[in-house]
Structures are given as C-alpha cells and as structure tokens.
Image (cartoon, rainbow, N blue to C red):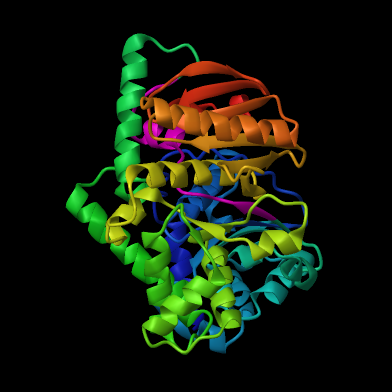
Amino acid sequence: MLDQLKEIILNNQNTALELGVKRDLAISTIPGKATICMGVRRGGKSTYMRQLLHILLQQGVARENTVHINFFDNRLHNLQHSSLETIIEAYYSIHPDKKNSQKVYYFFDEIQEIEGWEAFVERLIRAENSEVYITGSSAKMLSKEIATQMRGRSLSWEIFPFSLAEYLICKGISFATNMTSRDRLLVQNGFSEYFTTGSFPEVAKIPQDLRIKIHQEYFNTILFRDLIERHNIKNPQAVIDVAYWLINNTASTYTINSLTGYLKSLGHKITKETLGEYLDWFEDAYFLFSVRIFDASLSRANANPKKIYCIDHALVTSVSSGILVNSGHLLESLIFITLRRITEKIYYYRTKNDREVDFVAIINNREQALIQVCESLADPKTLKREVSALNEAMRELGRDSGIIVTLNEDQEIEVSAGSIRVLPAWKFLLYIADIL
C-alpha cells in the first residue's frame, strides 16, 4: 500500500490541473479547521477542489507541498484495512525535507469511503503542519457527530451542480444587470438549453442521447454506491422501486403510508421505519429532497403529506417514465434546487381555504419568501388560481409581497395583501440574491 500511495501522490503532483468552469462559491478557510465540501456525486466537487488547489499554487505554494488523493481510486481498495497514517508516511518518504519544516496541503476526495477518517484528519490538523480539504457525497459530513468526532476542527460547505449563471459561463454566454436585447435573447436561449440539459457539469456540452445515458448511470451509481452499499441494505430492489416512484412523482406529494402500500403491492415486506430511513438516505446523498408543510406545529407538519424534489430536473426526464411528470413539475423542481442553494428551510403552504403555495423559503433565518411556480399564466383561470392562493398566503402569514415564477412572463400584480411580482425563470435564477 505504501508504494501505491507514493505512486498516486507523485502522479497527481505531476498532472496538469483541469479547472473547468469557475464555481460561484466563495468558501472561507480557517486555520486549524478542515474545509469540507459536500454534494451529490458528479456535481463538481473534485473540480472545485482543483480550483482551490490552483489558487494556492498562484499564491506561491509549491506543487510538491500538496497531496491529492481520490478514495474512489481502485488502487486504494485495501487502504480501509490498513492505517490512513500510511498516507503521511508515503508523502514524507518522497519529500523527507518537508517534515517539520513546511506546510503540506492535503486534498481528499470522497474520504467518507474510509471508516475512521475523522480521527485521522483531526490528528493530521492537530499534530502536523498542514491544511486539509475534503469532499464527500454525504450530508452527514455536516452533522454534529462529525464536529464532535473531529473536536470542532472542521467547517462544512455545500456544492450543488451548475447554477444557471455557471451554465451560461460554461456556454460562453455573457450576462449582466444591464443587458442589451441581443444579450437577453442569448440568455433566454441559454436558459432553454439549461432547462433541457440540466445542471450536471459533465452533460453540459454533450448530445441528448449520451446525456440520457449518463443521467441513468448517475442514477444507478447513486443508488448502489451512496445508498445500497454505504448502508448495507438487505433489500436493494425496494430502494430501487421507491426511488423510481419518487422520481416519477417529482414535485408531487407523498405519505409514508402510501409509499409503504405501494412497496407492499410489489411484494416488498418493509416497515414504515425502514422506509423513513431510505428517505433520509436519499436526502443525505443530495439526491431526493422531502419538503414539509409550513406549520408551527412539528407534529402537524409531520402528519401532513410531503413533497418530493430531485437534485436535477433533467435527470428526472432521463430516468422517469414521463407519464406523471410534466414541464410544470420540472420547473418547480428547478426552482426548489435554486432555493436550496441558499437555504435548507424550505416548505410548502396550504391556506385555510386549502389553496397551495409551492414554497415558503426562510431567508437568513428570518425573512419568509412566498413563491409560486407556474409554467404560464396565459389562461385566465390559471392566473386567478395562482394569484388567489398567493394572496391568501400573504394575508395569513403577514407578508406584503410574493413571487410567481413562470417560463416567460414578467409583470407586477397588485392584490389586497400587497404586490405580486411575476418573473421569468431565467431572471429569477440569475438574480435570486437580489430578488429575495
């Protein structure tokens, strides 16, 4: 294992960095703490690590002072059966002059694959002259448990696949607050492509048939690597079946009872508790997200149906049967992920007259943003339904403003509770920080 690690370290030190599109994420490193970046598999975490490494090199850090290891490397399969300390031994056997004299920068991709990594990283930060950067496809790396095991020596950040802004940069489309008519048309066309292609970086520039195939491979890999293998699930087909059901019902409600009944109809013997674990694991892998109803009572919120959203709207079209999912559902899923980039506190709302508002997002832990998503308001009945629901919610929650996101419309609507801003999705996605 020592020789294999030395080979990996040397290869990475002598390999040109593929930097990709600059990500719209500004992390802050703190001395004495590991920087942890988490997100869905294939969402761009490793590329972002290389960008951070590139910044260090520009600041004068020598490449020989860096160690970059991806724990999905097949050559490291047996590392979990030996000591992670071998990594330090391997590095200093290559560069003995660095020991106790120069800082070493460690970059570890998907380190959660190795049991006991927390203690190793904690010791590395505490006892060695080092900085540590980590990626992982598990939200558990945000948890208090990790902070406890590392004795507070970590700071976690989330990375999602491409935002619209990053996608436009990838496509070479410029955008600014004051755009010309031509620039606006290019941005709108870019959004149309983004709405079709999705947000995973790898598929941004490939043909549709290959994109669908890659999406399906992502789906299978997430299920098997991040759920079935990671949690040693004894009934993998049940996980696969429930994942397909949830994908096919994106932006719709579900209950544990209905899901349990569905799985039993397929011959799976599964308890509600086990199904609840599956749902938690889907979210832990940044794959499928459940949204509760907005209610001051947690027990009432848990008793109501939840809504389900996927990490990527285009992955839904590549994997689902297409019977139950329409473009309105996909737009709603896209808006959810856009909100999820800036807050975890996202709910749906049901008024006293049983009208639904798609999202109540808590911004900066205090401001409630009310957001309705509708493909088009061209039909007067649709316009009346969406505006009435949002107006009721604004009145009940004491808000004087609300937002309706559509594919193309842009206008202001005055209602009894205040004003509603109707925005095209491209504008909402690009300028969400200013809008909310």
Does residue 134 appear left or right of residue 14 in this picture? right
Where residue 212 appears, as percent x and y from the top left, is 25, 56
Identify the residue at image location x=64%, y=78%: 85
Where residue 344 appears, as percent x and y from the top left, is 65, 50
Does residue 67 appear left or right of residue 302 in this picture? left
Where residue 255 appears, as percent x and y from the top left, is 54, 67
Check the picture and name the quadrant holding the C terminus.
top right
Is residue 272 covered in magenta? no
Is residue 168 covered in magenta? yes
Identify the residue at image location x=35%, y=55%: 316
Q: Give the camera-side residue of 380 and 217.
A: 380
Residue 107 placement: quadrant: bottom right
Where residue 315 appears, as percent x and y from the top left, is 35, 55
Q: Is residue 350 in view?
A: yes
Q: Give the camera-side residue of 121 and 169.
A: 169
Q: Is residue 130 in view?
A: no
Residue 56 placement: quadrant: top right
Provide the residue span drawn in magenta.
156-175
Residue 55 placement: quadrant: top right
* Above or below for 287 versus 370: below
* Above or below for 403 versus 315: above
